[in-house]
Image (tube, rainbow, N blue to C red):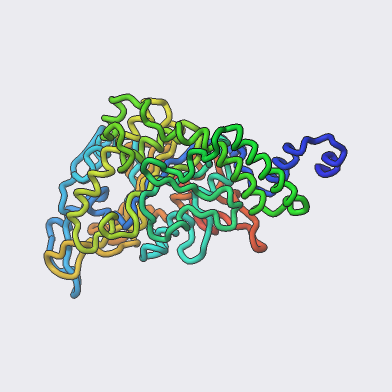
Amino acid sequence: MIRSLAGGGMLLPGLLSDMMAESAGASPARRQPHFAPKAKRVIFLFMTGGVSHVDTFDPKPFLREHHNEPHGKKSVYKGADWEFRRYGRSGIEVSDLFPHIGGVIDDIAVIRSMKNINGDHFGATIGIHTGSATFNRPSIGSWVSYGLGTENRNLPSFMVIAPEIPYAGGQVWGSDFLPVLHQGTRIVPGEEPIANMHRRASSAEAQRTELDMLDYFNRQHLKGRELDSNLTARIKSFETAFGMQAAAPEAFDLSGETDATLKLYGLERGNAEGFAWQCIVARRLAERGVRFIELIDGGASLEKNWDTHAKMANYNKLARNVDRPIAALLKDLKSRGMLEDTIVAWTTEFGRTPFCPAPNVEGRGHHAKVYSSWLAGGGIAGGVVYGASDEIGDRAAENVVSVHDYQATILNQLGLDHEKLTYRHAGRDFRLTDVHGKVLHDIIA
């Protein structure tokens, strides 16, 4: 019907191409959720390397009381190196590593019973992001982009601020079998966060002429191939890039931020690096309609991530880098009335063992059987603790939360039914949560 209308001149070519791209699933146009949402967007904070739960958000007095005492025949208990203190009206205990986050704990739902599906960095990292630890699958950000689209056509719906490449590399923000347009756009802090962000043509008019000519030849090539989602996404990407050259420089320009705001985040004026910069830019992207923003702290280098096999004392520096900015992000969003419709998710791929091979060993090993994460904003109840680990933090003892449960809850707050958000590929309907997942209704306000 669309082709016949176009043939009769009743549809403009530009409208036709947009409709065909939309039918191929390549357009990031805004879409309707399955039901009334509590949140419009997500800021996903991922700490690369496996943050120790028993040193941060899950206090274990037993470990400190029995520090260096035998645990079985081949290990000893290892107590936390930091004190835990109660914060806020809720009195939730948080480690001295995160005093600023402790100060906003009444806005946070702490989950102490997370369990991942894999115990190595690669598998656990893609597990928390894609719901699968063994096969390539689209990232949660890509699923959200596919399900809801963007509110700003000049910016990608899914953006990832990552100074370093994390374990599992670009699969963390990959779209896999979803249309390419829903893949995350990586931002690297610095003078030019996105490559070629500024035009090379002598003027906007000259660039527009070049792009119009390129678009003409691309559209000619598209004829007869309208259902090729990769091709339609490639064509659309040129338009998105053109829009980004207009919108992105302004989004990354912090010169208009007040001194008070920069001080809140702990960011020196003119500095375009560090987690404080990532957080303040995340707020600015959220304001401008980006649907899913992921901030990644750390990469695959042991010196720059939370993978502390050898020395837990590295947490002092790592925590200082993120504690104040994260708390500032929550305060800033709240003061602007944005926290109520923005989900802020903080997680890592797994926790750390509550025991070590010998007395006075300074590090901890991988531990996927139980760890801690948290959610805030977007209709999530604040000042609550959900789930619990056992006495030593070895296993989940109450209300086990899988990565699929965590993902299903985020989607639910966005008005997306995780069982209905599907994409037909290779003869079956795939979804982020595979055949698993339950919404954590007990932490919803």
Towards the viewer: 249 or 398: 249
Residue 240 in the image, given as x and y percentages of width and height: 58, 41
Task: Find residue 141 and report its horizontal and vertical position in percent.
Answer: 49, 48
Quarter of image, res 282: top left
Which image quarter: residue 376? Answer: top left
In the shown orientation, is residue 179 left or right of residue 283?
Answer: right
- Residue at horizontal 20%, vertical 54%? 314
Q: Where residue 289 sits in the image (x, y, percent)? A: 51, 34
Left or right: residue 391 versus residue 232 is left
Residue 277, relative to residue 419: is it above or below? above
Residue placed furthest toward the front? 202
Q: Residue at x 24, y 59 (%)?
A: 308
Inspect this view and state whether residue 260 appears: yes
In the image, 115 versus 329, the foreground residue is 329
Quadrant housing residue 396? bottom left
Q: Is residue 104 above or below residue 111?
A: above
Q: Residue at x 42, y 61 (%)?
A: 168
Q: Residue lying furthest bottom in this view? A: 73
Quadrant of the frame with the N terminus: top right
Question: Which residue occupies 42% across, 35% down?
Answer: 252
Q: Name the residue nearer the viewer: 4 or 421.
A: 4
Q: Position of residue 99 (x, y in %)?
A: 21, 39
Total marks in image? 0
Could you tell whether 319 is left or right of 234 in the image? left
In this rendering, does residue 397 appear at all?
A: no
- Which residue lies most toward the right here? 8
Which residue occupies the foreground of this view, 281 or 372?
281
Q: Is residue 105 left or right of residue 200?
A: left
Task: Pick the quarter of the image with the C terminus.
Answer: top left
